Amino acid sequence: MLILLNLDAPRQDIEAIKRKVIGYNCQPHEIPGESNLAIGITGPTHKLVEDEYRFMNSVIEVVRVSKKYKLVSRQMKKNDTVVKTKFGDIGGKELTIIAGPCSVESRDQLFRIAESLSQLGVKFLRGGAYKPRSSPYAFRGLGEEGLRLLDDVKKEFGMGIVTEVLSADTIPLVAEVADIIQIGARNMQNFILLDEVGKINTPILLKRGLAATVEDLLLSAEYILAQGNFNVILCERGIRTFETSTRNTLDLNAIPVIKKNSHLPILVDPSHGIGIRDKVPPMALAGIAAGSDGIIIEVHNDPDNALSDGVQTITPEQMSILINKIKAIAPIVDRELN
Ligand code: PEP
Ligand code: MN
C-alpha cells in the first residue's frame, strides 16, 4: 500500500501514520519523491483499511500496489530514481560508463587499465577482487589484496570503484573501497546477502541471474529496498537460452519492460551478455538504444592473457571507438555523455 502526502506534511502527521501502520506489524518506508511525500507500506498490508488513512492529516491519496514487488515499482514512485555517487549520478540524463577488467590481477595491470580509461573520460572502474568462478580451480581473485589495489588506483586516478561482494562477512571491507557494490548474477537470489546490503547505504549494482525472470530480478531488488537501501541499480547481463553460438543471450527486452515497471536505473553488460569480444561493442550500442542508463563493460590492456573472461574483453583502443559511437547515439535517446 502507498500513502501519498503533501510535500510539506509536518513531521507529526508522518509519524502518526507510521505509528498506526507499525501497530499492524507492517513496515512504513519513506520514499523520496519530487511532487509528493510517499510512505510505502510492506508486510501484511491486507490488515490495513484504506479509509483509516485516507482521512488522516496531510494525506492526499491511498493506493493499493498490485504488483508482487512494491518498493521498486513505478506505482510506488513515479519519477526515475537517480543514484548519486561522488563520481557521478546513475539514472539521470548523463549515461554511465563503468569499465575495467573482469578481475584485479596485479598493480601493474590495474594501473595501466585505469590510466587508459581515465584518459577516455571513464568515471567508474570495475574489477573483481572476489571472483565467483564456475570451476574451483580457476583464478578466484586477489581478495583483500585486490581491494587494496582498487583503493590505491582510486586515489591515483580519482575514479569511482565498482567491485563485487560474494559473502555477507566481507561487506564492511568491500564497502570501504567500493563506490558501488556489485551483487553478481550467481548471487542474485542469495537472499541473506541481499538483506545485508540493504542495511548499508552504498549503491548496489544488482545483476540479473542466469535463469532469472525480470520479475525475479525486481523481487531481489525489493529485498534490498525493504531493508532501507534505495540506492539500487539493476543490470541486464544476459540469460541462458537454447542458443549456443553466444555465451548468453542479452535480453534487451528487459530494458523497456523494467523502465515501465520500476523507477530504478538499469545498466547493460554487453560483455557477459554476448561473451565474444568483437561482438561486444554493437550490443553495448544496442543497450543504449534500448534505453539503458549506461553500460558496464570489460576492458583489459592485454585481453588475450587476462586471468578471467579475456575472450569477451575489449582493448582500450576498442573502448575509445565505442565511446565515440555512444556519444553519437546518445542525443537520439535523449541522453548525454560528457
Ligand atoms: C563480472 O562482472 O565479472 C561477473 C562475474 O558478472 P556476472 O555476475 O554477471 O556473471
Ligand atoms: Mn567477468
Image: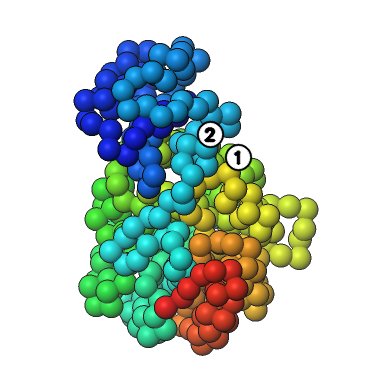
**Residue found 50% across the figure and 52% down from its top:** 234
Q: Is residue 307 above or below residue 69?
A: below
Identify residue for label 1: 215
**Residue found 63% across the figure and 54% down from its top:** 256
Q: Is residue 131 visible?
A: no
Per the image, label 1 sits on a secondary structure element best described as helix
Q: How many marks?
A: 2
How packed mark 2 is, by other alpha carbons closer than 10 Å (few <14, some 14-19, many 20 or more), is: many
Q: Is residue 252 visible?
A: yes
Earlier residue among tags 2 and 1:
2
Q: Is residue 234 above or below residue 338?
A: above
| Residue 111 quadrant | bottom left
Q: Nearer the viewer, residue 211 or 122?
A: 122
Q: Is residue 251 left or right of residue 74?
A: right
Identify residue for label 2: 69
- Tags 2 and 1 in contact by the CB under 8 Å rule? yes
Q: Position of residue 230 (x, y in %)?
A: 38, 44
Q: Position of residue 296 (x, y in %)?
A: 49, 66
Q: Nearer the viewer, residue 229 or 78?
A: 78
Q: Nearer the viewer, residue 317 or 15?
A: 15
Colour treatment of the image? rainbow
Q: Quadrant of the C terminus?
A: bottom left
Q: Amino acid at mark 1?
A: Glu
Q: Position of residue 276 (x, y in %)?
A: 65, 72
